[in-house]
Amino acid sequence: MSNTFYWHDYETFGLRGDERRPSQFAGVRTDENLNFIGEGEVLYCRPNRDFLPSPESCLLTGIIPQYCEENGLPENEFARAVFARLSEPDTIGIGYNNLSFDDEVSRFLFWRNFLPPYTREYSAGCSRWDLYPITLAVWALRPEGIEWPLRKDWIPKLEAKRILKDENPDLDGHTFKLECLTAANGISHEKAHDALSDVYGTVALAGLIRKTKPKLWQWAFKHRGKQAVIEELNRGPVVWVDSHIGQTHGYLKCALKIAAMPHDPNRVLLWDLERDPEELFTLRSEDVERRIFTSGDENDPRLPVYTLRVNKCPFVCSHLGVLSGGQAEKFGIDLEAVKRNAEKFTPERMSEVTAMLIAGLEEAHEKEIPEPEQDPDEALYSSGFPSRSDSRMVEKVSGLTGEALAESYHEGRIHFDNPVYDQLLLRYRARNFPETLTDDERTLWLHDAKQRIEGRKDSYVETLDQLAVRTGEQGRPILSALYDWSRGVFRDLGI
């Protein structure tokens, strides 16, 4: 069966940690040729009453919690709706920078609402992809035929439209903001930071790349999966495109895989082939943690070793010729030095380096200090994978009505090996089915919510006051709504 793309985007009530609660979700399905299948759709998520939205995010998107409360789905229903769309067999979930942002929103949304956080990424023929690194790869490797907007030309225009303005915007180099790319290339994108508008803008940008760079598009599509990435890395030196490398270097590295992380095979270590590896060859296992992960001393600098996640659809190509001499020179990459340094990794030396690194990583792992206990809403990664029993219980919870869930829990038919699920379940029931709580459960819930919110009250109100001065009349309607929302939360929790 052919794959379909499900292009999607979230707007959220915050950008960091627990603030990244969805306010709006939009999506549209296309076939592999980017022909639309059905209409685009928009969903709003009703915010919980134990949550304070980020004022900065509301000023950016224009979405206030009262609108979502009136027009949105309860979070558990919203989560199931999103999950169903991304889990349809043979779906490729895709967006613009979705691997770093939207997919994290989805994972934590599913986690809070007792849905499997990862299955839609690999089961039933489903997978994911991201247009953002492909866009960077086109700019770095094959830029002809597409207009690449400069920050100095476009960022001031964006800032002029915003309520909350950046007082000192970076105007150097190119911008890869979606709204700038679409405008520079004559693509209709009527309302940035509106989820559906962003989705259609993303599809149009993908169509432009697919049309102007068909070979690169097909190659990237074919090599997006984890196994294809591993095969490319195992062939030898690769050209790697990654946003963290930096624009002045073309977001490019010529690199070589030197080891896989023993306790996380999805993470591999790469050596920067622009650097002579002789120092790596003399590294001792006891120095691995310090020289690769922690050292910031000028006299004892970190080695040029980078971490790549093979399960995040990175752009890696084992054909160094994909980087032309002209582009390499433009970004200061000496291809001859790259080849010389790669040749120093003889099979014997590579074997020694890999063994040394694995030994050092094992030593570092044994010395790791356990992370402090996280808030249940944020404990997806720290809680580990669920036991089989817990997986069955999670599936059971998501399929029950509020009344049936309360009855099953009180009669002991729902129980977990990992206590974090018990904490999560109380919040899930309180947020979605508050009428089913016992008096004791309600008291426990209010105490938990009050503890999380009370310490933020003064700083939250102070932030609203500061933003009111900074944004003036433009920001007044949104900030007034947030004052009202926060007062309601404080009142409901007895703060």
Image (spheres, grey):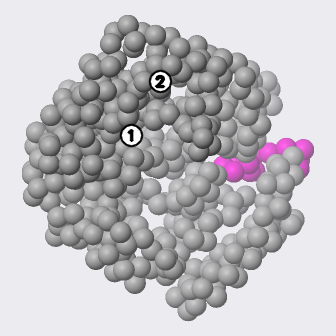
Q: Main secondary structure of the magenta part?
A: helix
Residue 135 among magenta residues: no
Residue 303 place in picture, x, y as percent: 50, 34
Q: Quadrant of the N terminus?
A: top left
User: In front: mark 2 or mark 1?
Assistant: 2
Which picture quadrant has residue 359? top right
Residue pictured at 38% horizontal, 23% vertical: 257
Q: Is residue 334 visible?
A: yes
Depth check: give the residue in front, 56 or 411: 56
Q: CA distance from mark 2 to mark 1?
A: 43 Å
Q: Is residue 439 left or right of residue 31?
A: right
User: Alpha-carbon neighbours of circle 1 within 10 Å: few (<14), some, or many (≥20)?
Assistant: many
Residue 284 place in picture, x, y as percent: 58, 18
Q: Which mark is residue 280?
A: 2
Residue 490 place in picture, x, y as percent: 80, 68
Residue at far bottom of view: 473
Residue pictured at 83% horizontal, 62% vertical: 454
Residue pictured at 42% horizontal, 70% vertical: 170
| Callout 2 secondary element | helix
Q: Is residue 229 above or below residue 48?
A: above
Q: Is residue 20 left or right of residue 343?
A: right
Depth check: give the residue in front, 358 or 436: 358
Stretch in magenta:
429-443
Looking at marks 2 and 1 on the same chain, the residue that comes earlier in the sequence is marked by 1
